[in-house]
Image (tube, grey):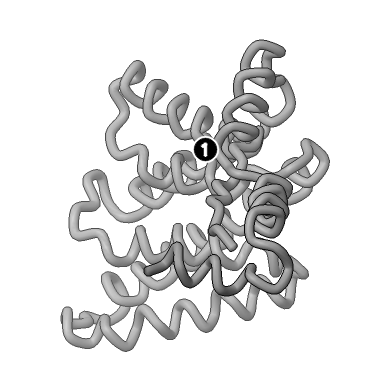
Amino acid sequence: MKAYMNIPRIGMRNIKTALSVFLCLWLYQLLGRENPVLACVAAVICMQNTIVDSLEKGISRIAGTVMGGLVGILVLFIVSDVFVVSEDMMFFVIPLGIVLLIELCVVFNQKQAVVISCVVYLTILISKNRDGGYVLYTVNRVIDTCIGIFIALLVNKYIVMPKWLKKYLELFNTGSSVKPEAENADAAKEKADYGTEGLHEGRNERND
């Protein structure tokens, strides 16, 4: 029995996610704004199958972004202005902030925002370059994340697959795999050539 390839289909969510990342990169290039990483990450995380799902998760992730930023500011304030914490001690301080942040997401019923809030928090805490002070840096990172979320929402709402592209993808997806029916047809032909009793023998001869 012959093996057949099963190449995954290219879906519209796939295309919209890639388009959202492209728009984030293009917008940052246009505005001369540095470091679009958080915007791109947020766009990928926020893209869902439907606009309703994207809107619900988008609102949740904006709340998570704000929480991640606030906890980041709080931790940086403590380690910078209240206590003088060495770089070695930050290995213990940063995970403690993660514990606090996840607990806040649970308390405020924002479990879907855990990932994006932790991403924002870690980006703020781990970064060594905080031009303008940690408060301004945190605000900018929150803005970056919100930009990515809004771009994903707009793309999911207004971008529809063109008919020509849909037909092309259908042809590509159809032609990229050998269907099991074709495999069954080969088996039937093999059976007709060798007969029921000689089928295995014939296959052995082919292998030899």
* Type of the residue with mark 1: Gly
- At 64% from the left and 61% from the top, the residue drawn is 194
Tell me if 112 is positioned left or right of 34 in this view: right
Image quadrant in which the N terminus is located: bottom right
Q: Quadrant of the C terminus?
A: bottom left
Q: Position of residue 29 (x, y in %)?
A: 31, 22
Residue 56 coordinates in the image, percent (x, y) = 78, 48
Q: Nearer the viewer, residue 197 or 92?
A: 197
Label 1: how many Cα within 10 Å (few below 14, some 14–19, many 20+): many
Count of marks overlaid on the render: 1
Position above or below: 80 against 188: below
Identify the residue at image location x=64%, y=33%.
174
Residue 159 in view in this figure = no
Quadrant in which residue 103 is drawn: bottom right
Residue 175 location (% of width, % of height): 58, 32
Q: Residue at x 36, y 38 (%)?
A: 36
Q: Residue furthest right?
A: 52
Viewer can see residue 121: yes
Secondary element under disc 1, as helix, strand or loop, is helix
* Image quarter of residue 171: top right
| Left or right relative to 34: residue 56 | right
Considering only vertical position in the picture, is 102 above or below 205? below
Residue name at image x 36 percent, y 78 percent: 94
> Along the line of sight, which residue is nearer the eye, 63 or 36?
36
Q: Where does residue 61 sit, x and y in percent of width and height?
A: 64, 53
**Circle 1 is placed at which residue position?**
148
